[in-house]
Image (cartoon, rainbow, N blue to C red):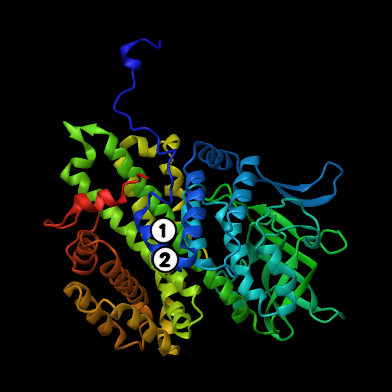
Amino acid sequence: MAGTPTHTVTNQPPPLVGYDVFAADRALTEAVERYTDPGVLDEVREELSALGRASGSVQLQEWAVQANEYPPRLRTHDRYGNRIDEVDFHPAWHRLLGKGVSAGLTGAWSRPAGHVRRAAAFLVWTQVEAGNCCPLSMTHAAVPALRTDPELAAEWEPRLSSTIYDRDLRPAGQKPGALFGMGMTEKQGGSDVRANTTAARPLTEAGTYVLTGHKWFCSAPMSDAFLVLAQAPGGLTCFLVPRVLADGTRNVFRIQRLKDKLGNRSNASAEVEFDDTWARRVGEEGRGVPTIIEMVAATRLDCALGSAGLMRQAAAQAIHHSAHREAFGGKLIDKPLMRNVLADLALESEAATALALRLAAAYDDDDEGERAFLRLAVPAAKYWITKRCAPVTVEAAECLGGNGYVEEWGLPRLVRESPLNSIWEGAGNVQALDVLRALQREPGALDACLTEIGRAHGADHRLDRAVKDLFTELADLEGAEGRARRVAERLALVLQGSLLVRHAPPEVADAFCASRLGGDHGASFGTLPTGLDLASVVDRARPTS
């Protein structure tokens, strides 16, 4: 009964809603200010705060829950027995995806401060619902691959950068906006895409082919077009596969099944078959990997951004809960041990945000040194940031106690999502080996990273010592494959340390350098050393606008 004392609810924190997700994140807002030209800064702030307020609203949080409670459903045939290969989504999915498109999450390449403002928006938007970020990411990332063919770029880029979401399957030329997917991996090869067996047979019209084969993972199968790899007469080649042909007929794109995934349940990932499927070549025959690699690099940055967003939301939820929950005679946030845990989570979140936004800023700069910096820093950041996401979300869930294990409180969805970005777009070993390749083949990439790290030289003795240790690791790269993860981790950590020493408050930089670079840290969160200003670290990360 409503009036019985046992049903009176007390000492429960209010939901974390009705706030500006962007403005409440000081690390993110400061990074945007740091990397945005003053002439457009007010415009960018206003745009991101509008998205931040929407992201923190009750309405969008409800849509996120619905999109995951009612996952996509495959319909291979219509009621007459015609093969249609369509995926049905809950209306909440379409509302969220439409909001993401309208917020400019597919249009970074031609706007002032385009990559920084989009990166910040992507980090915010991930905190609402990460599944719909997949088609947004691939659509954004397809642009540099398409630009290898100016004719294709002129045709498709305006559709991809559009702020209008059109869910209907019809010829892309008849739509105000379009989305892109990607199909690279196959059953027998996985990340070893050169083992792909999908065959491409040339047609009489120049640049056109038909494909026969399969893709073991095809993300966002209801997109308007896909970039795929197939074996042409001249070798592994990149192709554009439209879902609907110009005459309105459906291209042969047979969805065999949808993957039943651990997390990311709102988003459809499929196994697809090609059978004389029409395709347009992108780039030269035999140059498939170099053509698509820029798309892969952009999606890898989005993996880092997505994990940074998940970690931020997890830390924000833990801090918010602890600021309202009382136990053992006081607020949890004021208990020394809980404060240590929360500060540790906040450090991981801020370091991830700082590095991810620095990479986005490099994309906005046409300088050759910035291009070289990205070649090495992107795989290192993707490796390390995405690796840290799972332990952060699990620890944050534990801060809520039993509530953190209950679906209604939102943390289980973050936990299930947390491993995804480490696996997608090349798992940990792939990233670490890519770091080694860049070090061995592109000396300019290492020079660019060392220049960036060196901007903090002399500011913190622990950072300086960590840089010397990195030099020791880099002194012998012959036979270094077994140490590749160690090298990638150390590179990412000194990059994060350099950024925090230069740009974060002293209490944040001090705690990061003492624990991550100085070695005064245990194997679990909440083991930061004594003598640090942890209250200031936690207060900085508290989600209050």
Q: Which residue is identified by label 2?
A: 356
Task: Give the position of the C terminus as an image quadrant.
Answer: top left
Of the pair 362 and 201, the residue shown nearer to us: 362
Q: What element carries label 2?
A: helix
Real-space Cα distance between discs 2 and 1? 8 Å
Q: Which residue is drawn at 82% across and 63% down?
A: 245
Does any portion of residue 524 appear in the rendered image?
yes
Pinpoint residue 269: horizontal percent, then vertical percent.
61, 55
> Which amino acid type is shown beneath numbered disc 2?
Ala
Is residue 433 depicted above or below 540 in this figure? Answer: below
Pinpoint residue 47: horizontal percent, then vertical percent.
52, 54
Q: Residue at x 47, y 58 (%)?
A: 42
Q: Which residue is drawn at 34% across and 79% down?
A: 452
Quadrant assignment, res 379? bottom left
Pinpoint residue 72: horizontal percent, then vertical percent.
64, 45
User: Does label 2 or label 1 sit earlier along the sequence?
Assistant: 1
Of the pair 17 and 381, the residue shown nearer to us: 17
Q: Is residue 261 left or right of residue 435?
A: right
Task: Give the position of the N terminus as an image quadrant.
Answer: top left
Number of residues whose C-alpha sits closer than 10 Å to that of mark 2, classed few (under 14), some (14–19) or many (20 or more)? many
Mark 2 touches mark 1? (CB < 8 Å): yes
Pinpoint residue 413: horizontal percent, then vertical percent.
46, 45
Q: In this view, does 176 lie to the left or right of 290?
A: right
**Residue that sits furthest to the left in the current view:** 531
User: Which label is found at residue 308?
Assistant: 1
Quadrant assignment, res 323? top left
Q: Residue at x 37, y 50 (%)?
A: 393
> Which amino acid type is shown beneath numbered disc 1?
Ala
